[in-house]
Image: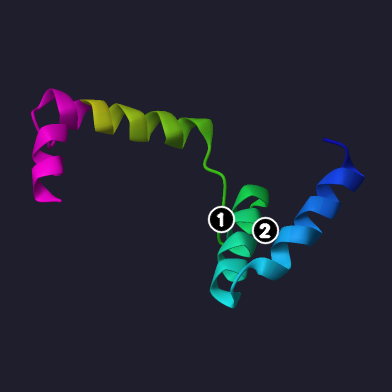
Amino acid sequence: MNKAAFKKEVDTYLPLLSEKQRVLVLDMIKGLLQVDGAAQRISKEQYNQEIEAAVARIESGDYIDHEVVLKLL
């Protein structure tokens, strides 16, 4: 889809949204673009540390099974 066609389609649908829906769409766009200054990228080292910590928790049995989560809903 080219830029003009995309803009036309957005311009067609945006007015149909409620104010709350427009805010949600804007928040999603900002999230995709990481416009919010509070959203910082983490370093590769921090990412790897977080993954290693998560794997260690899983290996130690510190997790909830998917079936249990479904029952809690």
* Residue bearing mark 2: 35
Give the overall secondary structure of the magenta segment: helix
- Give residue 8's position: percent from left, percent from top: 85, 53
**Tag 1 secondary structure:** loop
Badge 1 vs badge 2, beta-carbon distance below 8 Å: yes
Give residue 20's quadrant in the image: bottom right
Label 1, label 2: how far apart the Cα atoms are: 8 Å
* Residue bearing mark 1: 39
Q: Is residue 65 magenta?
A: yes
Q: Is residue 61 among what the camera can see?
A: yes
Q: Residue visible at 11% across and 34% down?
A: 67
Q: Residue visible at 87% across and 44% down?
A: 5
Single out the residue that lies furthest toward the top.
Answer: 59
56 relative position to 35: left or right? left
Say which of 11 and 43 sits in front. Answer: 11
The colour scheme is rainbow
Q: On screen, 68 above or below 52?
A: below
Single out the residue that lies furthest toward the right.
Answer: 4
Amino acid type at mark 2: Val
Of the 4 image quadrants, the one containing the N terminus is top right
Q: Which residues are magenta?
A: 56-73
Q: Residue visible at 14% across and 42% down?
A: 69
Q: Is residue 6 magenta?
A: no
Amino acid type at mark 1: Ala
Say which of 17 and 35 sits in front. Answer: 17
Q: On screen, 52 above or below 73?
A: above
